[in-house]
Image (cartoon, rainbow, N blue to C red):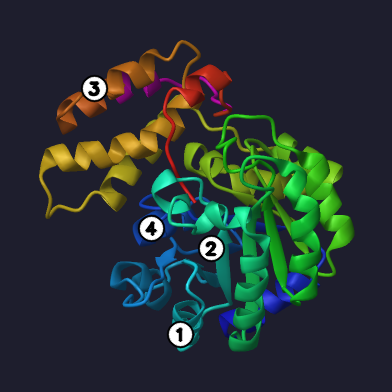
Amino acid sequence: MNHHEQFGKMLAGEEPILALAPMQDVTDLPFWKLMTAYGGADVYYTEFFRVHAVSHPEKYILRSITENPTDRPVVAQMIGNDIPSLVRTAQELQEYNIAAVDLNLGCPAPIVYRKCAGGGLLREPWRIDAILGALRDAVKVKFTVKTRLGFDSPEVFDQLLPIFAKHSLDLLTVHGRTVKEMYWSEVHYDLIAQAVAAMPCPVVANGNVYSAQSAEEVLRITGARGLMIGRGAIRNPWLFEQIRQQRRGEPLFIPRGVDVLNYVRALYDAVCSPDVKESAQVQKMKKYLNFIGAGVEPTGQFLHQIRRVSTKVDFFRVCEEFLDHDRPMALEPFTAKVEKAHEVEVA
């Protein structure tokens, strides 16, 4: 069964779809491979392909499709605003074994939205209408959209939903914040529920799912067809499997400190290329530890120390100081303050 058929069966099924969110320079091919060892997601979204007049799909992102290690459907995500270029790229991507083409309407990075791409397009609903119309004609596999509620106010969401509804999307993922709210405000789950009620296609909820219990609560509040999880899954790679255990009524696997330490070691081996300097490897790991660290301890000391190391020896010395123990770790963020201390821009 190809990925398009696999994804179609998921959409027609009853169990919630669990998706790994696309996060630029984080959820790459090596990370996908590692995630499968912990149970993994049901569907994986690529990092976004940057689309413009002279672009070609980035080879390093294409590897996530051509060397997909997950045995699960892959959705190819694009970001851009030039209609001919988006149509051309969508056609190119459909030459590969993908489940769907996704348009990113949510990236909050200023370098993106200032170019009127990603979340920046939410300021121009008429332009989204034109883009979706052209892409729906060009995409013969499933066509999906990942959006936020608006740019600086969720009031525009009432204008966006009819546009999404009219273009026969196969799935809409809603991150329940505006672009300006980034990742730190409360999630507007009531507006995700509004999308569920208004859309003729399934809706997936995105935003602040950090435990099996919070997953159940978000599904209950929103009525969503599934969940897309990013930071929570990086912090806790067991999260997707914990959600499945919760739904089956089974005891949840709760990692101990040493399990988390082993995850960090496996993560280092997976994502740090031996072809780059040790200092660059440590810098890359700090990006992941920004997410993991918020669930390690409440004072912020772990992240404070990790951000100041420059060698592999010192990196693991700090990790061992905080994680080399047998106590259970819920890996839920202790406070918004700890997590907000590192604003990482992701898709």
Q: Amino acid at mark 1?
A: Arg
Q: Secondary structure at mark 2?
A: strand
Q: Nearer the viewer, residue 61 or 282?
A: 61
3 or 4: mark nearer the eye:
4
Q: How far, Cα to Cα, is label 2 from label 3?
A: 33 Å
Tag 2: Cα neighbours inside 10 Å, few (<14), some, or many (≥20)?
A: many
Q: Nearer the viewer, residue 33 or 126?
A: 126
- Counting residues from the start of the chain, the first of labels 4 and 1 encountered is 4
Q: Secondary structure at mark 1?
A: helix
Residue that mark 2 sits on: 44
Residue that mark 1 sits on: 88
| Label 2 with label 4: CB-CB less than 8 Å | no
Q: How far, Cα to Cα, is label 4 from label 1?
A: 24 Å
Residue 319 percent location from the top left of the image: 32, 25
Q: How far, Cα to Cα, is label 1 from label 2?
A: 22 Å
Residue at (75% x, 51% y) in the render:
157
Q: Amino acid at mark 3?
A: Arg
Q: How far, Cα to Cα, is label 3 from label 4?
A: 26 Å
Q: How far, Cα to Cα, is label 3 from label 1?
A: 49 Å
The answer to whether residue 122 is visible is yes
The span shown in magenta is 319-330
- Counting residues from the start of the chain, the first of labels 1 and 2 encountered is 2
Q: Nearer the viewer, residue 233 or 139?
A: 139
Residue that mark 3 sits on: 317
The label on residue 28 is: 4
Q: Left or right: where does residue 184 sit relative to residue 92? A: right
